[in-house]
Image: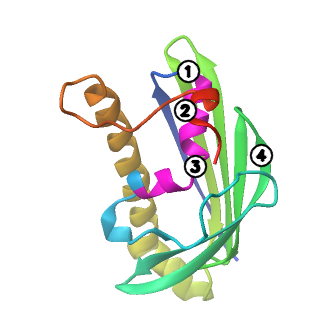
Amino acid sequence: MKTYTLMRQQTIARPIDEVFNFFEKPDNLEKITPSSVGFTILTPRPITMQVGTVLDYTIRLLGLPVRWTTLISVYNPPHSFVDVALRGPYSFWHHTHIFRESDQGTIMSDEVRYSLPFGIFGRLAHFLWVKRQLEHIFDYRERVMADSLQNDDAEGQEGIQFCPRQKCGRS
């Protein structure tokens, strides 16, 4: 089984608590995922993030809904969390989210390690489609975050809501 790695890093001009608070809320994934992915959360709300939280959602692959279940295996606010797939389109999925303070705000790093089923056919699908699709999703997220931060203070614009835990609370 071939394992692939996708790594991304983005600096977000907000304090670490605000950035972590945003990314630990599963509902925000819908805001930063391209609509073409068809990302829909099935887990009843409210969702409390902690080690052991199980999240169910669907995505669309080739127009067909696919159920995906992940487990929060590491939860270390406001520095990191890890989600791993229990079931879904990948035979292996391990996504580490790391948040570090910097002079410019927060450096958010993602490391996604994943494998596809179906042997040689999975490798071919990765080459033809899966790698580009994952890069598109993470590129989209980066653009949405950057645009939201630019428009956050503009009159009439609704940017992504960032707020400290104590004001927004944890869900």
Front residue of 26 and 138: 26
Circle 3 residue: 25
Disc 2: which residue:
19
Query: Circle 3 sits in a helix, a strand or a loop, which is it?
Result: loop
Regarding mark 2 in the picture, which secondary structure is present there? Answer: helix
Q: Nearer the viewer, mark 3 or mark 1?
A: 3
> Answer yes or no: do the residues labelled 2 and 1 have beta carbons within 8 Å?
yes
The residue closer to the viewer here, 163 or 69, is 163
Q: Residues within 10 Å of mark 4 (few under 14, many from 20)?
A: some
Q: CA distance from mark 2 to mark 1?
A: 6 Å
Q: Which residues are magenta?
A: 16-30
Q: Would you say the residues marked 2 and 4 are in contact, meaning their CB atoms lie under 8 Å apart?
A: no
Q: Residue at x 54, y 78 (%)?
A: 123
Q: Which amino acid is tagged 2?
A: Val
Q: Which residue is mark 4?
A: 75
Q: Quadrant of the N terminus?
A: bottom right
Marks 4 and 1, the one that precedes in the sequence: 1
- Please state if 77 lies on the left or on the right of 126 as rendered: right
Amino acid under disc 1? Pro
